[in-house]
Amino acid sequence: MDLAFVQSRLLERFLDSDVISAEEVATLLKRRGVLDGTPVFLEEETQMPVPPLCEYGRYLSTALLDETTLKDYGRAVRRLDDHLAELGSDVLSAVESDLVSYRDHRTRWQDKPIGGSAWGKESFVQDDLYGFLVDRGVLTHRPARVAARGRNALAPRLRSSMDIRHLTFEQYRYFRDVGLGGQLPNSQVNPTFRGWSPLRGRAGSDIALGSGTRWREWSTVLLPEIGLWPGMPGGAAEFTVQACAKYGKDRPVYVPEDAVASADLFCLLERPDIVRRAARGLERKARDLFVVGDVDVAGGRVRGVMDGVVREFQMSAMDAKLRRITVYEGEFGLEALTLFVCRGGLMPGADAWKGYRHRAWTRMTELADETAPRLPARRWRWHDLRHTYALRLLTYLENLMDGEAGPPPPAPLLPDRAHPAQSAADRQPPTRSRQSRNHLPVSPVHGRSDQRVRGRLLRLGGRRRGDLRRDRLACPVRCERGR
């Protein structure tokens, strides 16, 4: 059995039929509520749909699951069918011994057995699939027995414990400066560093720690949300996350001033070069992008052209897929509206951030010496920064109840731009606007914002933003307002 996924944006490029047009198919998919990522199961020889399994894919689509979740569920069903085919069976005629054989194969006998957590997800998909087939009358009963209180008998017996780790101050500085920033343990420049855009990783770690948000929330932040937009004052930022939040629940997010300053440094020193190199490629793909022409900072909305239609979205309601293709007319041409960009000019994906973290861990282990902090056996994850934020916040609240509260967290964990021995007047940061940023306390050591240049300040020229234009596409457009 073969597996395919619904991708409505590819219809116009690849569908060539005299029977039905690509626009009609896209309209039909939208009317029927078939989401992108919906699995479609096909016979291997005839390439005809398998009706019961395709109905299950349609059922998953109506549950409003995420595109990646839909694809994961589809792949789980295909792996089950492939194993059953080797046993001379299939999904519809499987018995309990076949499912037990598949469980043992996945958890014990294959080249790289999966753990209990991964098998728990696959067993859930199996239980949900056969429950659907029984409810629709395709099967009379489930092939596997039902345990006490309706529990899935093939699910893992042991409950996995929570893996909660946090970083100390020294560990975080080592992770940020040596791993992501490409420095030596003694804060000197590493001449063998071959990384690319070290300030991007430093800004990401500062925002993750300072805001306590999940990876999907801070890595998809837009420039207007974090306050790095023309006309917006500097300092701390506060915005709402919803579509990129867990379970889609909206909540406010606060990013401290030091974390915003780290992102501002990335926008000044590294981001313009990335944007300039990728501008020409984005111009060629303008028809596949959401070209923003108007940004309402006060209302939290963006308005632009996508697929020849004028669309308007609430920023908090924009999911990661839409944020990735959102661009605007900048100084060098089209550039991403997201804070973080990669070589292609658009927002880095999950695999890219995973690669940044893995390469950072490799540098940390290779450069570790007697002065380096103790490293765990397993590499750090981005989510460990969220645990660190939570621990620091709980410690502060506990000290506050005991009357021993110090400065509010997580400021002690962020770059200490002012020494504690300095007076309050010396530690007071200068207020500046986004349009006047010509003097910043930055050192030339990979843009370290926590080390001042002795004797003078590094002089930087402010960036000029290009005028926003609404007529990026030459084709006629129609207005469509949506949330």
Image (cartoon, rainbow, N blue to C red):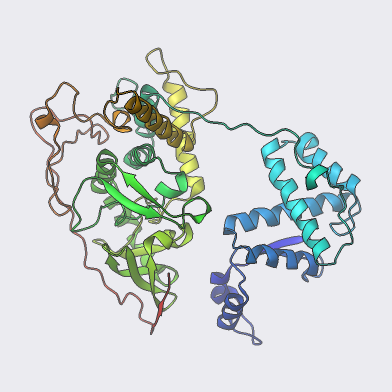
Q: Is 10 left or right of 87, judged from the image as shown?
A: left
Q: Quadrant of the C terminus?
A: bottom left
Tell me which residue sits at (43%, 49%) in the image.
217
Q: How many marks overall?
A: 0
Given residues 78 and 167, the one toward you in this image is 167
Q: Quadrant of the N terminus?
A: bottom right
Residue 5 rendering spot, x and y as whole percentages: 65, 64
**Most extreme residue toward the top, as rendered?**
370
Residue 445 rendering spot, x and y as whole percentages: 24, 31
Q: Can residue 43 be seen in the rendering of this structure? A: no
Given residues 432 and 437, the one toward you in this image is 432
- Above or below — where is 447 with respect to 27? above
- Above or below — where is 234 with respect to 37? above
Q: Can residue 359 be seen in the rendering of this structure? A: yes
- Above or below — where is 177 with respect to 81? above
Residue 464 rendering spot, x and y as whole percentages: 18, 58
Q: Is 296 left or right of 161, judged from the image as shown?
A: left
- Above or below — where is 84 with respect to 319? above
Residue 459 rendering spot, x and y as whole percentages: 12, 41
**Most extreme residue toward the bottom, as rendered?**
18
Tell me which residue sits at (37%, 14%) in the image.
371
Tell me which residue sits at (33%, 45%) in the image.
254
